[in-house]
Amino acid sequence: EVQLVESGGALVQSGGSLRLSCAASGFSFSVFWMHWVRQVPGKGLVWVAHINDDGSVTDYADSVKGRFTISRDNAKNTLYLQLTSLRAEDTALYYCVRDPDDYSGDFWGQGTLVTVSS
Amino acid sequence: SYELTQPSSVSVSPGQTARITCSGDILSRKHGRWFQQKPGQAPVVVIYRDSERPSGIPGRFSGSSSGTTVTLTISGAQVEDEADYYCYSATDKNLVFGGGTKLTVL
């Protein structure tokens, strides 16, 4: 069974930093691209970042470029998102998402909540 | 950048068929996908690759695609199907999302 379990969300002050983790199991983590997506509670979803299978290629939404860093450790089957220079508008539920696959399907984690206080 | 457009709300009576559409240029080149989200819960994918249903998803959920529009159909909607439904697609660069449709079944 595919599982994606996020952790690391917390209440942090504006300007602070946080590292989110996503522990993956039930599939060959090292062959899949991975994404982070965020959702302000009660609102829509926004793609945040992605990383390729070996970690050599990353990309970010303009709103987080230069402040967030996506990375992965394939030996530990874990995806990370380092958040720095946090702003109130970064407050959201952050989801770990396996890259959509037309043959084996799509998988989302349960989310981890980041709250930035101003 | 790509956009996906969904109706903000759909309402049906129990047992009726609910249809939720999602339109966007990207859907002529990439598959559409749907997830269900109930308050306070994680997303549950109900359709991927336009019309594929993951294991464990009831057969009343189906998907279809035509041109730049994908449609989620819930045949014989149940009260427990009341939720927000989001369409999304994977571009070459990122994931794009519709704004969500609140399905009311009552």
Image: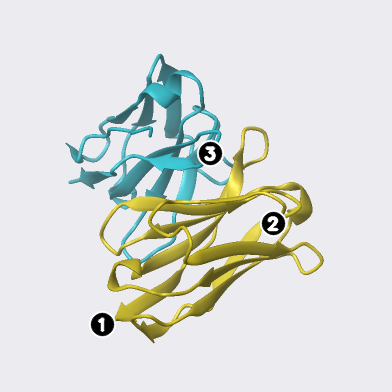
Chain colours: A yellow, B cyan
- Picture layout, residue B93 above or below residue B42: above
Give the SS element for disc 1: loop
Residue A51 falls left or right of residue A91: right
Is residue A28 in view?
no
The quadrant where residue B85 appears: top left
Q: Residue furthest right?
A: A75
> Whole-Å distance between the Cαs marked 3 and 1?
32 Å
- Picture layout, residue B7 above or below residue A69: above
Same chain for mark 1 and mark 2? The answer is yes
Quarter of the figure with the C terminus of chain A: bottom left
Q: Residues within 10 Å of mark 1 (few under 14, many from 20)?
A: few
Q: Report the chain holding disc 1.
A: A
Residue to which mark 2 is pinned: A1
Q: Residue furthest front?
A: A66
Give the SS element for disc 2: loop
Residue to which mark 3 is pinned: B93
- Picture layout, residue B96 above or below residue A44: above
Label ID, residue A118 = 1
* Amino acid at the residue labelled 3: Lys
The spot of residue B96 in percent (x, y) is: 42, 40
Give the SS element for disc 3: loop
* Residue sitting nearer the eye, B96 or B22: B96
Identify which residue is drawn at 53% across, 35% down: B48
The spot of residue B47 in percent (x, y) is: 49, 36
Identify which residue is drawn at 34% across, 57% down: B38
Quarter of the figure with the N terminus of chain A: bottom right
